[in-house]
Amino acid sequence: MSKFYYSILFVMFFSLTGTSQNTWDLIYADMQTSCATSSCHSNSAASSLDLEGNGATAQQDVYNNLVGTVPANSFAAGIGYKRVYPGDPYRSSLFRKVCDDLDDFVQLDIAEGGVMPPAGGLDAKQKELIRQWILFGAPETGMVIDTAIISDYYNGNGVDGVPNPIAAPDEEDGYQIKLGPFFMEPLDEVEYFLKYKIENPDTIEIHQVDVDLGQLYSHHFITYRFRNQGESGQPAGIPNNYNEGLRLDNAHNDVTFVTASQESSTIDLPAGTGFRWLPQTVLDLNSHYINYDQNKILKAENYINIYAQESGTAVQLMETDLYVNPSIVIPATNQDIQFTDNIVGSGIDKAYYWMITSHTHQLGQDFDVYLADPQGNADNQIFDAEYLDGDPNGVFIGYDYQHPPVRYWEYPFLEVQKNIGLVQVATYNNNTGQIVFWGDTSDDEMMITMAMYIEDTTGLGNFENTNINLHSNQSSFELFPNPANDFIVVSASLSPPYNITLSNVLGEIVLRQNIQSNLEIIETRTLNTGVYFYTISSNKHNQSGKLIIK
C-alpha cells in the first residue's frame, strides 16, 4: 500500500472530541489509536511510513509525507494536485478522496481512484475538519477551528452564505475557483485573504469574471494579483512572505487590483480587451463576510468563474485602479460632512474609462465623481451613486452603500486626461456618538473609487459588438431608497406579477406583498429601525438583499 493511502487511512476514524491543542495532533493521535491495528495495514511492508511508531519523529514523518508532496497517482500529479495542498482542499488528493458527498464542488475523476474509505466511515463533521485544516494552511501546530462550531453547524444550527452556487464554466471556456467555506459565530465579522496560485504554464487572457457572493451576508469580494509577476516580461513570482491558507493580514503593498464586487455580478469585458495573466500568476482573493444572524453559525464561501479567451485576442489590455482616500476622519456631529479628494494619474496622460463605481461603509450618504479642470477643481460630473446606473442624468434611486451602482460607457468609452485627473467627493453622516476613522470593518469607514480603463482604443473599432449592454450587470429589480424611512419603491424590468418579502434578523417575516405593477410604493413607517432582508421573486427571477430602515 502506498504512503499516500496510509496517510489517508489515519484520518478515517479520528474523534472530534479530542483534547489535543493542535489540529494536527488530534488527527495523528486518532490515527494511532483507531487505525494502527486495522486490516488495511496488511500490506505495511509496502510503505516506509512508520504508522505504528511512537514519538515526534514518526508524527513528523507522516506530516512531511503528506503536506506539499506530489501524489503517487499519475493523474492527480499531472494536473498539479498535492497530497495536501496547503490552503486549497480542492487540489488536495487527501480531501478529494475522503470528501465523497460532502460537497458537490468535488467531482472525483475515475482516474483518481476510489473514495476513501471504500465503505464510508467518516461523517460530515469529520470530513469538514479535514477541509478546514487544509484551508487554513495545513499547519503542524495550532487549532485552526473550534470543533464545536463544526458540530453546531452540522447539527442543524447553521445557515449557508451561498445556498445555490453558480454553475461552473464549460471546461473549454474557463474554470471555477471556490474560496471557503469558513464558519462564523452569530453576529461575527471577518475579512480573509487567500493566496491562490493559478499555476498556468502559459499566458492566459481573461475576458469575463463572475462572482457569487450569495444573497445576504457577504460584504465584498475582491480579486488582487501579486504585483511582482511578469511586470518586466519575466515569469510570475511566488510570493513567499505571506502564509498559505486563509489569513487575516492583507498584502496591499505587494498586489495590484483586478476586480471587486459588493454583490453577485458578472464583469464581461468589451470585445477586443482582456486581462492578461502571465505564467504562474498568483492571485490574492479577499472575502469579507458579516453574520447578521443572532443565533446560527454561518457557512461563508465565494465562487469565482474565470472565463478565458485565446491568448492574443485582446488588442488592448484592461487596467484597473483603486483611488483611495484613507485620511477621512468623520466627527460624530450627526450632520452631513463631505470629503473631496483629487485623483491625478501617473505614467500616461490619457486613458479611456469603461467603468466606474464607488465604495463607502454604512455612514455613507452619497458619492460623486467629476472630471477635473486644469486647476484640479471638480468640473463635469460623470458618476453619482444616488442615481440608477451611476448616471447623474438618470433616475434617482437614493444611496445604497452595500449595492453601489456601476456606470459603464460604450465604445470609444470616456476619455480622461489622467495627468489632470478626477475628483471624488463622498458624503457621510456620523450618528454613532464617536469619531469614525478609515478602517476595514463595517464599523469603520472607507472612501474608494474603482475604475477600469484602457490606455488606447486602437484596433477596437474592428470588433463587432464592441458596444456593451449597459444594463447587462444590473438587477431585474431595483429597491430604493436604501436606507429608507417611511417608504420604499420597487422598480421591475420584468413583467408583473411578483412578490416581495421582508424579514428581520431573526428570520421573522414582517411584510409580504404581491405587486401587480412595474413601479410600486410600499409603506415601511411601521417597521422598527434596523436591518431587514428582502426577497423579490417572480416566476422568472429571484433577487435578495439587505434593507436598512433608519
Image (cartoon, grey):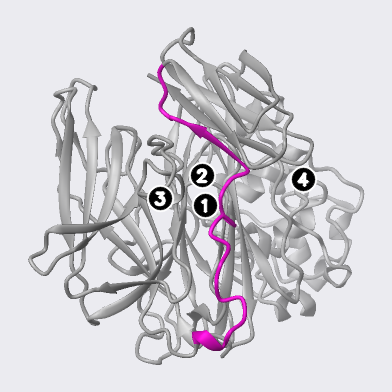
Horizontal side of residue 387 vs 422, given as left or right: right
| Residue 327 included in the magenta stretch of the image | no
Marks 4 and 2, Cα distance to the nearest angstrom? Answer: 19 Å
Of badges 4 and 3, the one in the foreground is 3
In the image, what residue occupies the spot 76% across and 61% down?
6
Marks 3 and 1, Cα distance to the nearest angstrom? Answer: 39 Å
Q: Which mark is residue 102?
A: 4
In the picture of the structure, the residue carrying the numbered disc 3 is: 390
Work out which quarter of the rendered image holds the C terminus and state it.
top left
Q: Amino acid at mark 1?
A: Phe
Q: Badge 2, how many Cα within 10 Å: few under 14, some, many 20+?
A: some
Of badges 1 and 4, the one in the foreground is 4
Q: Position of residue 79 (x, y in %)?
A: 70, 77
Report if the CB atoms under discs 4 and 2 are less than 8 Å apart.
Answer: no
Residue positioned most to the left: 375
Work out which quarter of the rendered image holds the N terminus and state it.
bottom right
Reply above or below: 410 against 106. Answer: below
Report if the CB atoms under discs 3 and 1 are less than 8 Å apart.
Answer: no
In the image, what residue occupies the spot 35% across and 68% down?
255
Task: Tell me the element at label 3.
Answer: helix
Marks 4 and 3, Cα distance to the nearest angstrom? Answer: 42 Å
The residue closer to the viewer here, 279 or 545, is 545
Report if the CB atoms under discs 1 and 4 are less than 8 Å apart.
Answer: no
Instruction: Compare marks 2 and 1 and give the one earlier in the sequence.
Output: 1
Q: Which mark is residue 136?
A: 1
In the picture of the structure, the residue carrying the numbered disc 2 is: 144
